[in-house]
Image: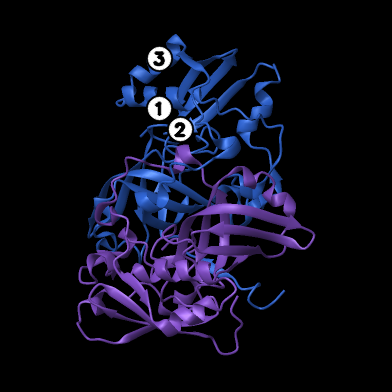
Chain colours: A blue, B purple
Amino acid sequence: MSARQSEMFPLRPIGRVHSPFEEKFGIPRQPGLVHVPAVIEMLPPYAHPEMFEGLEEFSHLWISFVFHACLEQGWRKRVRPPRLGGNAYKGVFATRSPFRPNHLGLSAVKLDRVDAGEGGVRLHIQGADLLDGTPVVDIKPYISYADSVEQANSGFAAECPHAQLQVLFSPEAERFLAGLPDAEKRTCQLVEIISLDPRPAYRKSSGRERSWGMRFAGLNVRWEVREDQAWITDISIESGVRAS
Amino acid sequence: MSARQSEMFPLRPIGRVHSPFEEKFGIPRQPGLVHVPAVIEMLPPYAHPEMFEGLEEFSHLWISFVFHACLEQGWRKRVRPPRLGGNAYKGVFATRSPFRPNHLGLSAVKLDRVDAGEGGVRLHIQGADLLDGTPVVDIKPYISYADSVEQANSGFAAECPHAQLQVLFSPEAERFLAGLPDAEKRTCQLVEIISLDPRPAYRKSSGRERSWGMRFAGLNVRWEVREDQAWITDISIESGVRAS
């Protein structure tokens, strides 16, 4: 290995994601599939309004980030993509798996607005598939003529994942949601997320009934899957967290 | 600054670009504008054929790389994008400028083929705007439904740069090119690159005549610009380098 091959480039987080996705389970496997807003809070010395002049001319951004929750698990040569049922292996570079060398993630997101002032800089985005606390390492404008390859052939990932489950609420869960200040928004978000069926692929075909849970936006949400229906059985406020 | 804000993520190069662009000057400002092939040579321990299984199902890739030739110059809060004539400033995060925090680059390129075997792994790509020797830090498949945002508004970068100069050859330059084994390919590439007018924007309007030079594919190429024509006056083999 030559000296050039062993060189390293230190990446500094330039921002941090604030997202209602408080754990990996439940996060859609690509951006843009659900209508969940998030905020990127820029960190000093990058929280400078001048650095974002002109950004609002663009409707979409590229967010480069670090899959920080997967760092300790390292990387794998091959992974089993969920869309192949969790049975078939593909090389890690043929997937968007977080278990990749350098653990870099990339998401195209919609830019709602830039809040820039003396108090710092916050980017309000939509459609992010980003875990709360994710370190952001770059932000670029989405430039259609260079980034939108309409004729691209996307192999085994050609088809957009679509809703797989009908989502129903127990009377208790429905009553709880109705009491939240943002009841309608949360209901829509939970339906979108759970209808995509976030269960690991190998568990879907096991036939064993069990209940699933996720933390989302300060809530604990539990559901069961029976055939092609997800029943949300229980929703409660996370202990020690205020629903936001 | 909290401990989390000051954390760093070391990036290791996973591959190295072999490209005919031997200096920054002349490189198109976005990928896909010229038909110039390049090769990414994977570095150990990432030069493993298993890591690329399934990649050839995809027609396009994302290459994440480090703008290594700009590291020493650091980053700027604002830059003057060439497409605005070099006079107007924009925030660095509203541009694809290399003078950005973390110096990360991102290019969508066409994948021609994957050479994977016991001798290593080489990805043959097209349309790259990458300097020879560029360190690659991630490779991902291009997934149309997530990456192609057809309705994106691209602000001041909405229009694809197009040929600005008619490219003409001096009899000497023409004769030299005709003697190369890959004469036709090199001629086309030089026309594409120089027609995009790689001169710095602020020099275009200065009215002062001078000649321009670039190193490309083992060649030294010199030209002059008169109104909307570029005259390639001289082409020679770089000293100490074999034309390839």
Residue at image mark 3: A174
Please provide percent x and percent y for residue B206. Answer: 20, 81
Residue A132, compared with residue B189, is above or below; it is above
User: What's the amino acid at mark 1?
Assistant: Gln
- Quadrant where the N terminus of chain A sits is bottom right
Please provide percent x and percent y for residue B233. Answer: 38, 84
The answer to whether the residues at label 2 and label 1 have Cβ atoms under 8 Å apart is: yes
Residue at the right extreme, as displayed: B118
Residue at image mark 2: A216
Q: Residues within 10 Å of mark 1 (few under 14, many from 20)?
A: some
Q: Secondary structure at mark 3?
A: helix
Q: Secondary structure at mark 1?
A: helix
Q: Chain of mark 1?
A: A
What residue is rendered at 70% in x and 59% in y? B121
Please provide percent x and percent y for residue B75. Answer: 38, 72
Q: Quadrant of residue B13?
A: bottom right
Sooner in the amino-acid sequence: mark 2 or mark 1? 1
The Cα–Cα distance between marks 2 and 1, rounded to whole angstroms, is 10 Å
Residue B192, compared with residue B157, is above or below; it is below
Residue A44, compared with residue A156, is above or below; it is below
Which is more toward the observer, A33 or A194?
Answer: A33
- Quadrant where the C terminus of chain A sits is top left
